[in-house]
Amino acid sequence: MSADHPTPSILLVEDDQMDVMNVQRELRRQNINVPLIHARNGRDALRMLRGEGGEPKIAKPSLVMLDINMPRMNGLELLEVLRSDPEFVNLNVFIMTTSDLESDRLKAQELAVSGYIIKPLSFDTFGEGGTSVDGFSLFLDLLKLKD
């Protein structure tokens, strides 16, 4: 892999272990075998991305899957920080949420999210008319994350 295209990886920021397992299972089902780096909350994710607080700095992920509802620093708060950091302003971020709250959606759109994933995660069934899954599949194909 060239420096322009580092090894693909996914950063999953999620505090619920069941949701983490769902994501892992769904990625396997889609034959997406890339490293999945897990952060339990927004603060942990920031430390990993920046290499702060004793955390080794992780390689910039190909995409971030971000849960909105988390303790300490929620998904939208983390997204705001990322969007104000020149190093991470162009990061591809997918928001994961159980809520279909219009306010969350509008806020996320303002923060330039790549897409929406309604939990529980199933790439077959979420989103209106399958638009989300098409977007996500297309995105994964673009990233060449699929084997």
Image (cartoon, grey):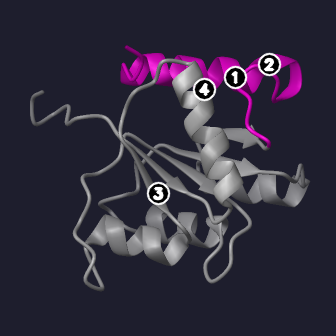
Q: Amino acid at mark 4?
A: Phe
Residue shown at 37% from the left, 58% from the top: 88
Badge 3 density bin: few <14, some 14–19, many ≥20, Cα 10 Å: some
User: How far is mark 1 from mark 3, CA to CA?
Assistant: 22 Å
Per the image, the residue denoted by label 1 is 133
Q: Secondary structure at mark 4?
A: helix
Q: Can residue 8 be seen?
A: yes
Give the numbered dot on residue 130. Answer: 2
Left/right of residue 20 with respect to residue 122 in the rendered view: left
Q: Can residue 84 be seen?
A: no
Nearer to us: label 1 or label 3: 3
Mark 1 and mark 4 residues within 8 Å of each other at the beta carbon: yes
Per the image, the residue denoted by label 3 is 38
* 63 relative to 85, above or below: above
Specify the quadrant of the image occupied by residue 103: bottom right
Per the image, the residue denoted by label 4 is 136
Which one is nearer the viewer's eye here, 99 or 123?
123
Q: Magenta residues, as a range? A: 120-147
Q: Amino acid at mark 1?
A: Val
Q: Quadrant of the C terminus?
A: top left
User: How far is mark 2 from mark 1, CA to CA?
Assistant: 5 Å
Residue 122 drawn at (x, y percent)? 74, 29
Residue 113 drawn at (x, y percent)? 60, 46
User: How far is mark 1 from mark 4, CA to CA?
Assistant: 5 Å
